[in-house]
Image: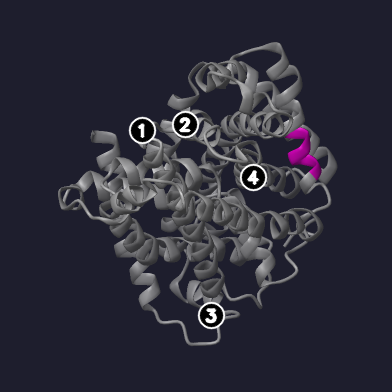
Amino acid sequence: MGSNKDSFSSKWGLIFAAAGSAIGLGNIWLFPYRVGELGGAAFLIPYIICVIVLGIIALVGEMTIGRLTGTGPIGAFKKALEMRGKKGTAGEVTGWICILVALVQAIGYSLVVTWVMRFLIDSFIGPAFTTPDSTQYFNVISSKSKILYYWWVPVTVILSGLSILKGIEKGIEKCCKIMIPAIIVLLFVLTIRVAFLPQASEGYKYLLTPRWEFLINPKTWMLALGQVFYSLSLRGSTMIVYGSYSKKSEDMISSAKNIVFLDTLASIIAALLIIPAAFAFSKDVNSGPALMFITMPEIFKCLGWGQFLMSIFFTAVFFAAFTSLIGMIETIVELLQNKFNMPRTWAIISICALITVMCDIFVVGNLRGVIDILELHLIPLCALASAVFLFWIVPPNNVIEEIQSGHPKPVSGRIIHMGRYVLCSIIITIYILNVLK
């Protein structure tokens, strides 16, 4: 590792930081939306299969190439080619693409986190709860206005920068160790409350009853795998950077399993919260982003202690979105530190200023379109690049040796075959289907 980089203090530091990057809006609004749209358990079945069979191996792969090379995607992919005695130019170009994808995602995500923060604050002080029309209120919050871009967005980005200013152990790790358990607990508390609502049982029936026509539809499997990569932050950047911060003594396989468990737990709890609540009040479970910003506030207005419960909900959502955003920002900060030798403070100031400016320039026009391009095209492409560089280009002995480091049991060479022929093949298939649909 470069001399300007610190590391996670323990395996759980890596787990909570990576889980913080993984657990985000994809868990709280996108996952319940997908479950509602694609037949309840008919989506849960392929999702769980994909996350166990492919999610773990993909996560191990990204963290492993990061720890093996001690750097982010640009340096990691370059060094992978050099291990084969080839020039690393193509690896650097690929790494830059992954970094740019992370930057664009961070810009769009900053805007959404800003909306969440507005809802959180206004839930506590009242306007988000007392407004007679949640749709109109959301439109005002998300509209392009001077107060949004000259005040709220900078505040969001500055908070993100301050949270990682002290580095990995005292910044990202400490932040995520507090926020990730809080997310799980807060969502669980709300789930218990929703369980006592009239007609909530209809939501559980919908959630747990497979609709087999969805299960045999290739689109369900395609979106299930896409959800796995989106939710686990498998985009050839953040998990590589977090892997580069981990120690050789840490067990990558065990860490990946724990990260997947926490991420899946958050998704399942969110689905058990939102779908029964929507059924209890005859709301549309297929309403996408509106499910979180419009439907859920309308539901809380109908409950006793509704303002308090709304505040709890948006606290959990903010923690989830915030920890994901700082993972994206750290990816760019690592680049500025490691490749350009920029002091950490100036690296954070530079990227925060860039994100703030870019939010106003090009994201607001079609945020949903930007998210769709990222999720359906660019993120799978970057995840594929990461898998190809580790499992096809890095010599197999180096891969096995790196994964074995910290793992108590012998690592089988089958992990290479899983990465090469199962993971890569399925990502390519999903990518082609996404392009052709």
Q: Residues within 10 Å of mark 4 (few under 14, many from 20)?
A: many
Amino acid type, mark 3: Gln
Contact between marks 2 and 1 (CB within 8 A): the answer is: yes
Q: Is residue 128 left or right of 161 when viewed as pictured?
A: left
Of the two numbered discs 1 and 3 on the same chain, state the one appearing first in sequence. Answer: 1
The residue shown at (64%, 23%) is 358
Residue located beneath label 4 in the image: 312
Q: Which residue is farthest bottom?
A: 409
Residue located beneath label 1 in the image: 284
Residue located beneath label 2 in the image: 295
Q: CA distance from mark 1 to mark 3?
A: 48 Å
Up-down relation of residue 237 to residue 306 (above or below): below
The residue shown at (72%, 15%) is 147
Up-down relation of residue 295 to residue 67 (above or below): above
Residue at disc 1, secondary structure: loop
Of the two numbered discs 4 and 3 on the same chain, state the one appearing first in sequence. Answer: 4
Residue located beneath label 3 in the image: 404
Q: Residues within 10 Å of mark 2 (few under 14, many from 20)?
A: many
**Residue 274, horizontal then vertical, whole percent:** 45, 44
Q: CA distance from mark 2 to mark 3?
A: 47 Å
Amino acid type, mark 1: Asp
Identify the image quadrant of residue 54. bottom left
The residue shown at (60%, 20%) is 131
Of the two numbered discs 2 and 3 on the same chain, state the one appearing first in sequence. Answer: 2
